Image: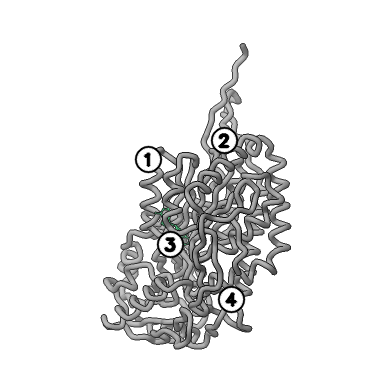
Amino acid sequence: MTDFAMTVGGAAVPGAGTFDVVDPATGEVFARAPDCGADRLDQAMAAARAAFPAWRRDERHRRDLLNEAARALEAAAGRLAPILTAEQGKPLKDARREIATAVTWLRYYAGLDVPREVSPDGSAEVIRRPLGVVAAITPWNFPIALAMWKIAPALRAGNTMVLKPSPYTPLTTLAMGEMLAPILPPGVLNVISGRDPLGALMTAHPAPRKISFTGSTATGKRVAAAAAEDLKRVTLELGGNDPAIILDDANPGQIADSLFWSAFANNGQICLAVKRVYAPERLYDDLVEALAVRARSVRVDAGTADGAQLGPINNRPQYERVAGLVGDALRHGAVAAAGGRPIDRPGYFYQPTVLSGATDGTRIVDEEQFGPALPVIAYRDLDQAVERANGTDYGLTASVWSPDLDRAARVAAELDCGQVSINAHGRGVRPDLPFGGHKRSGLGVENGLWGLYGHTDLQVLVGSQS
Ligand code: NAD
């Protein structure tokens, strides 16, 4: 695969050079992506700026084109999914599901009615004005879905965009940009690719009025600092260390499936995946075993293989990080109830790993592992478990598991994060609900009306008789 182009001003354009893209199922380079130089970035920003005045004027047109984009993306899923699997590693059926998610988001924002806001006495209207050019930067775990969390609300609100995917997964986003080029007016959606420094060039560029960023907390801080220079608006969707708290009346056998997949879906490479489980001592052994049974039975294989449930970890640094965190936990007294090792084959395959005997203070409990390894931590006192769950700089999502919904809700109310699910995890990830992190998990929210408002500034229009 070598024929991927960037989309700038509606045209397919090359970069100043190319960079390699690795298939994580083999560890081999399988494609090259355009490496956008500074001049081309200027062109993309200029194209987005030029497209803005006309694009922001006609809301009906924007809604129609988002619907058309949804139809085109849906029709292209069969072509795009194998590219996504090749660069990201996820099983083909998950790649198709991710593209279907993006279609859902486009349709949601095309159909969303934005209420008119008028002061109670009718004398003033509060108008949500689009900002102008939005620079969007995405990570490698869900390149298409997370790009669409930005594209759909930003464009619907009347902004134009320059979008940069992760250098690990640039291809599907580039292909989507080319596919949407005949539908959207030139310059409305520009897709460029390059290595990490291109992201820094985007955040420092004078054209964007907003940076919409999804990625790690470390990079998010750099983005915020760069944006502060000229007061660009920012939305930051960052990392998490999401706890699941199991109450002592839960049934391990009943919750194990849902809990397992809440941690291991997409190979644990989900910002809101369950990253640590707090289990009461009474249920501890049964829960660890129920999770371990599932971990041992999962089919890990190349995303293209029939029946693969999990693919490889996306990239070598992440693979080494997961291996390092598991190794560290094992050296500090944790036991691998399942997994605990890389899988002996080319590519970045790692055994789904359930760790018992892990404690707070171990790196895999305290840090975001973002991979297929889950520590289960025993607790005696529920208040302490809640305190430990909150005892992190992250605050993305959490879950509480118990048949007693009132009791679970009381525990949920104590958790400092952007979303808490009961007897599930991440159930509130929907186009119509706000998604965002507390503390160092982010700033602002995406999705719903709130996500659209995040791409606007307020303007008060006050009328009076002359
Ligand atoms: P990352 O921060 O390394 O990279 C994210 C993006 O930022 C990439 O496109 C990268 O090229 C770009 N980038 C790198 N340096 C930059 C800079 N100085 N300025 C601007 N852009 C720069 O993150 P990653 O490893 O790709 O993704 C994994 C992380 O993303 C995890 O921490 C995960 O929790 C987080 N994440 C969060 C959410 C959420 O919604 N909260 C969703 C998915 C992933």
Q: Earlier in the sequence, mark 3 or mark 4?
A: 4
Which dot marks residue 412?
3
Closer to the eye: label 3 or 1: 1
Question: In this view of the protein, can residue 381 be seen by the observer?
Answer: yes
Report crowding for label 3: few under 14, some 14 to 19, many 20 or more residues within 10 A (C-alpha): many
The alpha-carbon separation of the residues under discs 3 and 1 comes to 38 Å
Q: Which residue is mark 1?
A: 229
Closer to the eye: label 3 or 4: 4
Question: In this view of the protein, can residue 414 be seen by the observer?
Answer: no
Q: In the displayed structure, would residue 250 be above or below residue 290?
A: above
Which of these two is toward me, 463 or 63? 63
Ligand 1 within 8 Å, label 4 CB: no
Q: Which residue is mark 4?
A: 91
Amino acid type at mark 4: Pro
Q: Earlier in the sequence, mark 4 or mark 2?
A: 4
Residue 61, image x, y percentages: 72, 42
Residue 457, image x, y percentages: 52, 36
**Secondary structure beneath disc 4?**
loop
Pick the quarter of the image with the N terminus: bottom right
